[in-house]
Image (tube, rainbow, N blue to C red):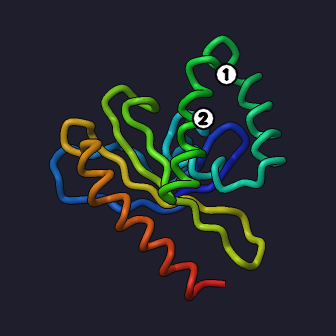
């Protein structure tokens, strides 16, 4: 679970599975807004005007890398609109796959994104799209029905 901090997302909470191979991300860790699934979920959850502001800031921040980064963000926005989640397949780190869903509090509090990520050899695209993503979307949907 993470929220935005300038050009990155900061982890507010973390749960670790029992698999021997896990990501070494702890509470307080910052990861890239532009290439991570959790960052893309945050961007996708914003109104078009705010998205444009974020993209302008990221374009400047990413510099020469922007032409490689932008298509992934655009795909994530489309995915969120169509499927309710965003992904990053080896784009944040070359051996990490992840999926994320934004939670938009009804009380106007900042958006929080929930995600699940892991080594690409075990957390495959197929597993994400057919199992993990639908369960994450349902988790956030259920949270939205009970939280302010």
Q: Looking at the rendering, in which quadrant would you find the C terminus?
A: bottom right
Identify the residue under disc 1: 62
Assess whether mark 1 and mark 2 are in contact (beta carbons under 8 angstroms): yes
Residues 119 and 51: in front is 51
Determine the image quadrant of residue 3: bottom right
Residue extending furthest toward the front = 82
What is the quadrant of residue 33 in the picture?
Answer: top right
Give the crowd class for mark 2: few <14, some 14-19, many >=20 residues within 10 Å.
many
| Residue marked by disc 2 | 34
- Taking the spot 57% from the left edge, 28% from the top edge, the residue there is 71
At a point 26% along the width and 37% down the height, the residue shown is 120
Residue 64 at x, y percent in the picture:
66, 11
Residue at the (49%, 45%) spot, across then down? 37
Q: Is residue 13 above or below residue 75?
A: below
Q: Determine which of the numbered discs, if any, sits on residue 112 in the image.
A: none
Say whether residue 66 is left or right of residue 130.
right
């Amino acid at each position: 679970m993470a929220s935005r901090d300038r050009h990155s997302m900061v982890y507010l909470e973390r749960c670790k599975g029992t698999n021997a191979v896990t990501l070494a991300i702890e509470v307080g860790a910052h990861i890239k807004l532009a290439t991570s699934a959790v960052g893309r979920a945050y961007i996708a959850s914003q109104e078009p005007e705010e998205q444009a502001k974020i993209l302008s800031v990221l374009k400047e921040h990413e510099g020469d890398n922007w032409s490689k980064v932008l298509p992934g963000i655009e795909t994530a926005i489309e995915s969120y609109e169509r499927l309710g989640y965003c992904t990053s397949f080896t784009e944040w780190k070359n051996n990490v796959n992840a999926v994320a869903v934004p939670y938009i509090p009804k009380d106007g509090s900042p958006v929080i994104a929930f995600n699940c990520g892991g080594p690409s050899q075990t957390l495959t695209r197929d597993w994400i799209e057919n199992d993990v993503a639908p369960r994450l979307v349902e988790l956030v949907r259920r949270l939205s029905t009970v939280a302010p």
